[in-house]
Image (cartoon, rainbow, N blue to C red):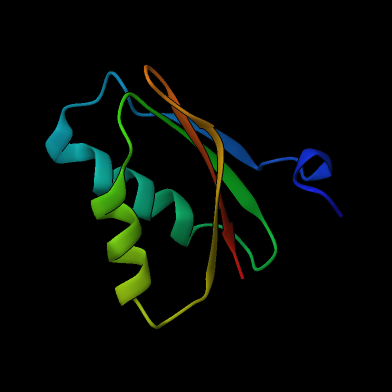
Amino acid sequence: MSLDTITPVSTLDVRRLPCELRRATIIESFDALEPGQSMEIINNFDPVPLRQHFEERTLVGFGWDYLEQGPEIWRIRLTRR
């Protein structure tokens, strides 16, 4: 199955959220996903620190796929494994 055929459970546009709330909001939404489900994140910069946070979490696996990589919008499909 290609990335184009996976429908995200939700799309989370965090561009208007204060920076201090973005990570917690994304993590909370990710934690609500069932295994195999995905969500799409829309941000105004590459959320590298967020990806590092997910890499350090060993509780569940995740997929991180860039759908769009700037310069103004980054779209990431985050999948719970």
Task: Please provide percent x and percent y for residue 75.
Answer: 50, 32
Task: Please provide percent x and percent y for residue 71.
Answer: 38, 20
> Left or right of 1: which side holds 68?
left
Which quadrant holds residue 40?
top right
Which quadrant holds residue 37?
bottom right
Task: Please provide percent x and percent y for residue 79.
Answer: 59, 57
Give the total of numbered labels.
0
Closer-to-camera residue (59/68): 68
Q: Residue at 59% of width from left, 37% of height from top?
A: 10
Closer-to-camera residue (33/13): 13
Which residue, as the protein is rendered here, is positioned at the far left?
Answer: 20
Q: Residue at 87% of width from left, 55% of height from top?
A: 1
Asked if 40 appears above or below 56 in the picture, the reply is above
Could you tell me which quadrant the C terminus lies in? bottom right
Asked if 58 appears above or below 27 in the picture, the reply is below
Q: Residue at 28% of width from left, 64% of height from top?
A: 53
> Left or right of 20: which side holds 30?
right
> Left or right of 17: which side holds 81?
right
Closer-to-camera residue (29/47): 47
Asked if 30 appears above or below 20 in the picture, the reply is below
Task: Please provide percent x and percent y for residue 27.
Answer: 36, 54
